[in-house]
């Protein structure tokens, strides 16, 4: 069994070290990750410059690009290692609800899934460094089952690990994505030259944390698994959209 591991926090992040250590107990592991923190880059590719890939002293490979770039280079620039499974994470902070649209962690798993590999994104619902023992236990639980009963076809699963002590993990639940409120996310500032600059601010508060959502179940102490899909088509709105455009010259049913 070969497992390719990526993330968006960079190859020096604690989360990817934890995941590689656990996965290494089950399979051959190769880590290909960004050279620095690339959180929030989503599925972006680097198209304006060439990419470099280097091997670090710990054996991890690091890339001068995005998580999506890393998946491509891990599969094509290092073709001696063909994965049976791709893991992304463990992210420093949750990726729930709308976060999945922006997350480089989820994006790496998504790219692998698009290329025909089963892929799992893992995130810890804490960014303070207090619950890595919980993340390690959760990774053990997940991989032990996943590798004993591999999925029959490629899957794209988003996993969030609760911010609780290892012994307080309540179990595992499948959950749907919740939602966040839209936030006022622009923070104006001035650089040392007095010029206006702007920071992207924090995410919005949670607007949908009903039972069954990833927000609610993870806060209750459960590891949550959300199956994701790529098709963004709103099939329920196809007829209404066709009705809207039908009177336009050239429209064809």
Image (tube, rainbow, N blue to C red):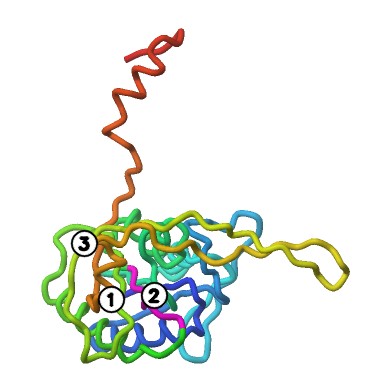
User: Tag on residue 2?
Assistant: 1
- Circle 1: is it few (<14), some (14-19), or many (20+) Cα within 10 Å? some
| The one of 54 and 103 positioned closer to us in this rendering | 103
> Alpha-carbon distance for marks 1 and 3?
33 Å
User: Which numbered mark, 2 or 1, is in the foreground of this view?
Assistant: 2
- Which quarter of the rendering shows the N terminus? bottom left
Task: Pick whichever of labels 1 and 3 is earlier in the sequence.
Answer: 1
> Closer to the N terminus: mark 2 or mark 3?
2
Q: Nearer the viewer, residue 45 or 245?
A: 245
The answer to if 85 sits in the magenta stretch is no
Q: Which residues are magenta?
A: 121-127
Query: What residue is shown at x 30% (from left), y 86% (from top)?
Result: 164
Kindly report the distance in space between the C-alpha atoms of the residues bearing marks 2 and 1: 16 Å
Local SS, label 1 = strand
Q: Position of residue 242 (x, y in %)?
A: 34, 20
* The quadrant where residue 168 appears: bottom left
Residue 119 in view, yes or no: no
Q: Quadrant of the C terminus?
A: top left
Answer whether residue 123 is magenta in the image: yes
Mark nearest the camera among 1 and 3 is 3
Tag nearer the camera, 2 or 3:
3
Residue 20: x %, y % from top left:
35, 84
- Is residue 33 positioned above or below 187 on the image? below
Q: Could you tell me residue 228's position as x and y percent?
A: 29, 56
Report the residue that reaches farthest toward the left: 149
Q: Residue at x 54, y 67 (%)?
A: 202
**Residue 146: in sight, yes or no?**
yes
Q: Which residue is mark 2?
A: 89
Tag 1–tag 3 contact (CB < 8 Å): no
> Under tag 3, what secondary structure?
loop
């Amino acid at each position: 069994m070969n497992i390719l591991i990526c993330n968006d926090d960079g190859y020096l992040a604690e989360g990817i070290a934890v995941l590689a250590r656990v996965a290494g107990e089950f399979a051959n592991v190769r880590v290909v990750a960004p050279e620095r923190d690339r959180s929030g880059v989503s599925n972006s590719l680097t198209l304006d410059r060439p990419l470099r890939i280097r091997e670090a002293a710990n054996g991890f490979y690091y890339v001068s690009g995005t998580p999506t770039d890393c998946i491509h280079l891990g599969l094509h620039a290092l073709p001696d290692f063909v994965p049976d499974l791709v893991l992304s994470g463990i992210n420093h902070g949750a990726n729930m609800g709308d976060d999945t649209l922006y997350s480089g962690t989820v994006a790496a798993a998504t790219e692998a899934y698009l290329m025909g590999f089963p892929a799992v994104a893992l995130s810890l619902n804490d960014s303070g460094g207090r619950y890595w023992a919980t993340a390690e236990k959760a990774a053990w639980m997940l991989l032990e089952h996943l590798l004993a009963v591999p999925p029959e076809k490629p899957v794209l699963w988003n996993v969030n690990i609760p911010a609780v002590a290892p012994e307080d993990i309540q179990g595992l639940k499948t959950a749907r994505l919740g939602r966040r409120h839209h936030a006022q996310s622009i923070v104006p500032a001035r650089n040392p030259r007095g010029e206006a600059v702007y920071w992207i601010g924090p995410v919005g508060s949670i607007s949908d944390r009903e039972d069954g959502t990833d927000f609610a179940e993870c806060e209750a102490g459960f590891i949550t698994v959300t199956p994701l899909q790529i098709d963004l088509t709103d099939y329920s709105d196809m007829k209404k959209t066709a009705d809207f455009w039908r009177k336009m010259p050239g429209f064809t049913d």
